[in-house]
Amino acid sequence: MKSLLVRKICLSLFLLLPLSLLNAQDLERAKDLWERGEYKEAGEVLWEILKQQQEEIKHLKKVIHFYSQELEEIKKEKERIERNIDKASANLEAARLFREGWGWQHKGIFEARNEKEKREYLNKAIEIFRQIVLRYPSAEKADDAQFRIGRIYYAFLKNYGKAEVELKKLVENYPESEFVKEAKVMLEKIK
């Protein structure tokens, strides 16, 4: 009865252990011992194989842990790159809109044939600059666009109420902007 139990355990071990991980010579030796009826010796060889397997499993766990960490780092890098791509795309679109708004502003200041046309061109510029501020508030040109909205109202449309609102937005939302100083000067003149 005891040898039958040992036989079943050994057979189970042969089936459970991946053959690719076993030492082929030790496995053959255990089989030979088993076939000759030397179950204790076969069990000892299998026991050594199991200990080797445990060490291999520990090593593989370390390898898996290492690669899991590497994959996590790659995932973080991918996310960072995607954010940078999104930011670059936003900056490109904001820059395109800025050039368009600047063109309308230029037309309103220098090319308008009459006051009505000037207002239309400048309002179109404001509309485009506002798109930048609303859609791309973190873009490199967002503070410049916000400043231009306030400046157009202040200097060209002479709408000081709207100019004050827009210039205050610049000061509040973009305190580090290079245009804050000039905006504050305009705000002082409005008071």
Image (tube, helix red, strand yellow):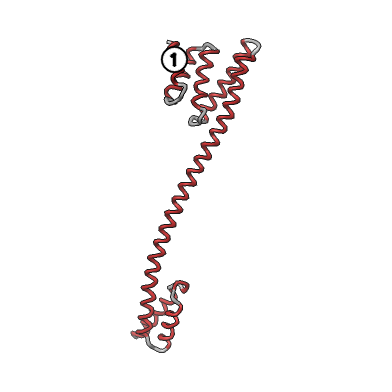
Q: Residue farthest to the bottom?
A: 36
**Of 127 and 92, the residue lying toward us:** 92
Relative to 129, 30 lies left or right:
left
Residue 43, position in %: x, y? 36, 81
Disc 1: CA contacts within 10 A as few (<14), some (14-19) or many (>=20): few
Residue 32, position in %: x, y? 43, 86
Q: Is residue 1 above or below residue 157?
A: below
Q: Is residue 120 above or below residue 143?
A: above
Residue 38, position in %: x, y? 37, 87
Q: Residue farthest to the right?
A: 113
Q: Is residue 7 above or below residue 89?
A: below
Occupied quadrant, residue 125: top right
Q: Residue farthest to the left?
A: 2
Mark 1, residue position: 185
Occupied quadrant, residue 90: top right
Residue 164, position in %: x, y? 46, 15
Q: Residue at x 58, y 28 (%)?
A: 97
Kind of element beneath mark 1: helix
What is the three-letter code of the residue carrying label 1?
Val
Quarter of the image containing the C terminus? top left
Q: Residue at x 45, y 82 (%)?
A: 28
Q: Residue at x 40, y 58 (%)?
A: 65
Quarter of the image containing the N terminus? bottom left
Q: Is residue 12 above or below residue 91?
A: below
**Of 190 and 13, the residue lying toward us:** 190
